[in-house]
Amino acid sequence: MTLAFILSLALVSGLQPSATPGPVIEMLLGWAVEGRGIPADPPATAPALPHRDCGGRLDPEHLPKTVYVSWDLSAEAQHAACNWKYDVASRHATPLTPAEAAEVAQRIVAGTVAPEERAFFHSTPQAGHRLTVSAGYCWGSAKGTFEVRVDGPVLIGELVIHGY
C-alpha cells in the first residue's frame, strides 16, 4: 500500500504544476457529493450524477465528513487504498500521509469505509494544460477533459455521465 502511495505521488508529480489533483478533486466531488455546478467553457449546466444518493445512503442534510480518493491507482490498488482525502465541510482536498493511507486501507479492508466515503479518479494529461479525468462516486461516473487555469479547472467539451 505504501508503494501505491509513492507511485501515485510520482504520477502526480509528472503533471504540470498547475494540474495537481487537488483542484480537480475539489471541483468534481463538490458536484458529485453536494450537487454544485462545474465551471465549463463554453458555459453549460452539468447533468446530475446518477445514483449520487449512494443507494439511499447519502442524506443531503448529513453529508460524509471526508471522502477518501483513489487518484490514478491501479484497478487492484484503488479497491484497497486511497491517496487523497476530500474534506466536505472545507471543500478542500489534500494528499494522505503514509500513516493516514495505512489507516484508511485498514478501514477499507474492515468494511468500515462506506460507499459515500469513497471516490475513484483516473487521469490522462493532455497538451495545453488539459487533463482528461474519469471519476466514479457511488454508482455513477463521469468523464471529461478539463483545462487547468489559474482560477481552477474548467470543463472543455462534454461531460459524459454513466450510472452502473
Image: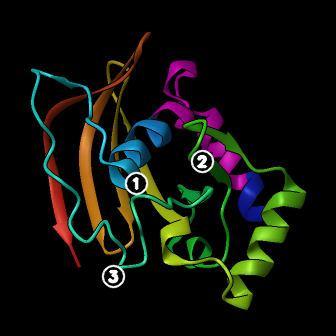
Check if mark 3's residue and mark 2's residue have beta carbons within 8 Å.
no
Q: Dot 2, crowdedness within 10 Å: few (<14), some or many (≥20)?
A: many
Helix, strand or loop under label 1: helix
Secondary element under disc 3, as helix, strand or loop, is: loop
Q: Is residue 150 left or right of residue 9?
A: left
Q: Residue furthest bottom?
A: 110
Query: Label 3 belongs to which residue?
Result: 55
Which residue occupies the foreground of this view, 133 or 136? 136
Q: Secondary structure at mark 2?
A: strand
Residue at the spot 75% in from the left edge and 79% down from the top edge: 107
Q: Amino acid at mark 3?
A: Gly
Q: Residue at x 43, y 48 (%)?
A: 29
* Residue situated furthest top in the rendering: 150
Q: Looking at the picture, how far across and down is residue 158, in whole percent?
A: 11, 40
Whichever of labels 3 and 2 marks the residue nearer the N terminus, that label is 3
Q: Which residue is mark 2?
A: 86
Reply yes or no: does residue 14 show up in magenta.
Answer: yes
Near mark 3 (Cα within 10 A), the count class, few <14, some 14-19 or many ≥20, is few
Q: Quadrant of residue 57?
A: bottom left
> Nearest the camera: 124 or 38?
38
Q: Percent from the top left, x then y, of residue 18?
A: 52, 19
Q: Which mark is residue 33?
A: 1
Q: With respect to residue 29, does 91 lie above or below?
A: above
Magenta-highlighted residues: 7-23
CA gap between label 3 and label 2 equals: 21 Å
Circle 2/circle 1 CB separation < 8 Å? yes
Q: Earlier in the sequence, mark 3 or mark 1?
A: 1
